[in-house]
Amino acid sequence: MAFIEIDGVRYPRITIKWKNIVGDFSTVSLEDAKQLECRLIITEGYLFDCFEDDGEMYVRTFATYQKDKDEIAFGDRNCFPYTVLTRESKRDLDAALMFMNHEDRSA
């Protein structure tokens, strides 16, 4: 699995495909209203972590980082509810989490 290593921590590279909410505030015909659909968005970056809050799972990613002396900072960050991910992305995420968990135990 492709990854980057930052200060001894390996972050797997991941592509996440997710469904984005789409809104429209204009008045349209019945046929036009039926055309409104969620859009598939593709995010590429590195898996930061996953966490659970109030019974729901979330995924955090980043795409950029900086390392100055002893300080590390992450940028281009996202936090996704697990439920908006496609099946394929959930499968890929599970593999990335296994990679991270294996790395944690190996250290």
Image: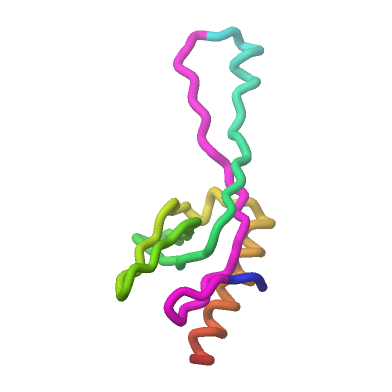
For this orientation, the residue located farthest to the front is 69
Compared to residue 100, the image places residue 13 above or below, namely: above
Of 53 and 95, nearer the camera is: 95
What is the x, y in percent for residue 86?
63, 51
Indicate yes or no whether the magenta region holds residue 8. yes
Residue at image location 55% in from the left, 71% down from the top: 4
Indicate yes or no whether the magenta region holds residue 22. yes
Q: Quadrant of the N terminus?
A: bottom right
What is the x, y in percent for residue 37?
61, 29
Of 99 and 58, nearer the camera is: 99
The magenta segment: 4-27
- Colouring chosen for the image of the structure: rainbow
Query: Residue 29 falls in which quadrant of the image?
Result: top right
Residue at image location 53% in from the left, 62% down from the top: 46
What is the x, y in percent for residue 27?
50, 9
Number of numbered markers: 0
Compared to residue 52, the image places residue 42 above or below, namely: above
Compared to residue 18, the image places residue 60 above or below, namely: below
Compared to residue 38, the image places residue 43 above or below, namely: below
For this orientation, the residue located farthest to the bottom is 106
Tell me if 72 is positioned left or right of 87 in this view: left
What is the x, y in percent for residue 5?
51, 75
Q: Main secondary structure of the magenta part?
A: strand
Residue at image location 45% in from the left, 61% down from the top: 57
Residue at image location 66% in from the left, 64% down from the top: 91
